[in-house]
Amino acid sequence: MEKDFDVIVIGAGVIGLSISYELSKKYSVGLIEKNKRYGLETSSRNSEVIHSGIHYPTGSLKAKLCVQGNELLYEFLRENNILHKKTGKLTVVVKEDEIKEIERLYKQGIENGVPDVKIIEKNGIKSFAPEIEGVCALYTASTGILNVHYLMDCLYEKFLNNDGIVGFDEKVINIEKKNSIYLVETEKGKYYSEIVINSAGLYAEQISNKLGFNYEVFWVKGDYFTISKKYNIPLLIYPVPMKEGLGIHLTPRLDGFLRVGPDVEYVEKNYPPYSNEKENSIFKIEERKKEFFYNEIRKFLPEIKIEDLNSESYGIRPKLQKKGEGFKDFVIKEELSGFINLIGIDSPGLTCCLSIAKYVKNLIS
């Protein structure tokens, strides 16, 4: 049976684009996306943060790939003149009983190989951001922000320049392995490849199921608000993290305003999350949350007023942990010879996009 490609990548979010670009340096690659354009789901609706790697258990894939990815991503952004800024981040203690968690994060960050991590006292917080109140804070210099749309545009162009081929508006309906070749069938055609990489994000479990691998993935929505008043806060401000997420945090946008969020809300998976065809209150920014966001932020930014918060956007990310469960790592593995699954790629997936691509390339090699 004659193959069309060496590799087919399913899903053109920032992870799929990164993998496709990396592999196109060596292989013939076809990229299949069910939407009409790349990056329309999780990849384009997030905090656009470049994470340092302090939050993930030492030895986990998230920890290793985040620290590696942080360095690779800054290098790529610089080389390609993509809008970004290494702002640094403060994780702020507002109650004495949170200090032990900050000390644990500091130790974990050092063990993970995160550079420039230190605990600073109250006066140190003021030197970074005068309006922020806290007992002490953990400072990570390697945290930053980027424009993810420009990043995806660059990856896409580089992939095409390497003779990569993309099929948009092609939903995968079947995958079969015939001898050493995979048949990937979409609503528009059939394609044959030696290797298939499932990078379908929110729908990765559905793709995985087609070859008999069953994972339970949960959709978690996060709303964002914007603060209309400008503050002198040039770096990211996070609370001490909670069990199910990193908490409601402040992210300086590249236009100078502050983004607030996201929260953590488990939602049903039965609807297209960004479809204009379905009017469902779940998939809207919820004004009722404004008071909750306000109360969380004023813990370390007491000057804020509730009327300064304006609804901005929402995003949905795939998680492997059920509500109330603790840490779950990325799943990036070769399930069958030539079939590589990427399941539950939530935060810090954006930071890890280039390191994940190299990891997948090593699995193939």
Image (spheres, rainbow, N blue to C red):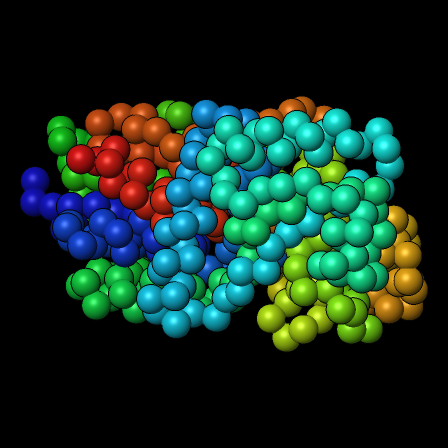
Number of marks in the rendered image:
0
- Direction from residue 213 to residue 223 in the image, left or right: right
Q: Residue at x 54, y 45 (%)?
A: 116
Q: Nearer the viewer, residue 253 or 112?
A: 112
Q: Nearer the viewer, residue 50 or 309?
A: 50
* 154 is higher (above) or lower (below) than 70: below
* 263 is higher (above) or lower (below) than 364: below
Q: Residue placed farthest to the left in the image? A: 2
At which x and y percent is residue 129? 75, 60
Q: Nearer the viewer, residue 112 or 269?
A: 112
Q: Residue at x 39, y 72 (%)?
A: 81
Q: Quadrant of residue 106?
A: top right
Give the quarter of the figure containing the N terminus.
top left
Give the quarter of the figure containing the C terminus.
top left
Can see residue 42? no
Can see residue 147? yes
* 157 is higher (above) or lower (below) than 325: below
At which x and y percent is residue 328? 55, 27
At which x and y percent is residue 152? 41, 63
Q: Residue at x 57, y 29 (%)?
A: 108
- Direction from residue 298 to residue 337 in the image, left or right: left
- Direction from residue 71 to residue 26 in the image, left or right: left
At which x and y percent is residue 219? 62, 40
